[in-house]
Amino acid sequence: MQFTQITMNRHLNQAALEQIHAMLSAGDLDEVSTMQLRQAAYLHAIVAAMLTNQVHRLPEAAPIQR
């Protein structure tokens, strides 16, 4: 199995966020898929903050309650 390494940059990260937003906006998702997309959006928001040197704008971490 071969893996292709892709370096994340602001353009790719923004494109991923836009795709996630479009999928969430479509509204045709089950509860699990919606939660997974929200988690992905959260991670991409963290990546965006890191890529733009704005880590200080991230909220404090809170315990996850499920």
Image (cartoon, grey):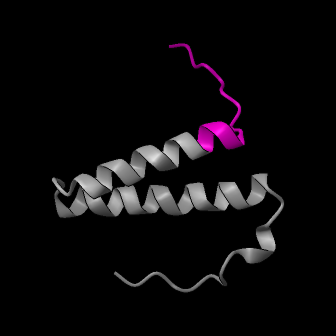
Q: Is residue 32 above or below residue 66?
A: above
Q: Give the residue displayed 24% in from the left and 60% down from the top.
A: 32
In the picture, which quadrant includes the C terminus? bottom left
Does residue 22 show up magenta in the picture? no
**Place of residue 30 in the rendered image (x, y in percent of width and height, measured from the top left):** 16, 58
Residue 56: quarter of image: bottom right
State whether the magenta stretch is mostly helix, strand or loop: loop
**Place of residue 57 in the rendered image (x, y in percent of width and height, measured from the top left):** 74, 76
Residues in magenta?
1-13
**Position of residue 55 in the picture relative to residue 21 (left or right):** right
Q: Is residue 2 above or below residue 48?
A: above
Q: Give the residue displayed 53% in from the left and 40% down from the top.
A: 15
Does residue 7 show up magenta in the picture? yes
**Place of residue 29 in the rendered image (x, y in percent of width and height, measured from the top left):** 18, 55
User: Which of these two is toward me, 26 or 36?
Assistant: 26
**Place of residue 64 in the rendered image (x, y in percent of width and height, measured from the top left):** 46, 81
**Position of residue 62 in the picture relative to residue 38 (left or right):** right
**Position of residue 20 in the picture relative to residue 45 (left or right):** left
Number of numbered discs overlaid on the protein picture: 0
Q: Is residue 41 above or below residue 60?
A: above
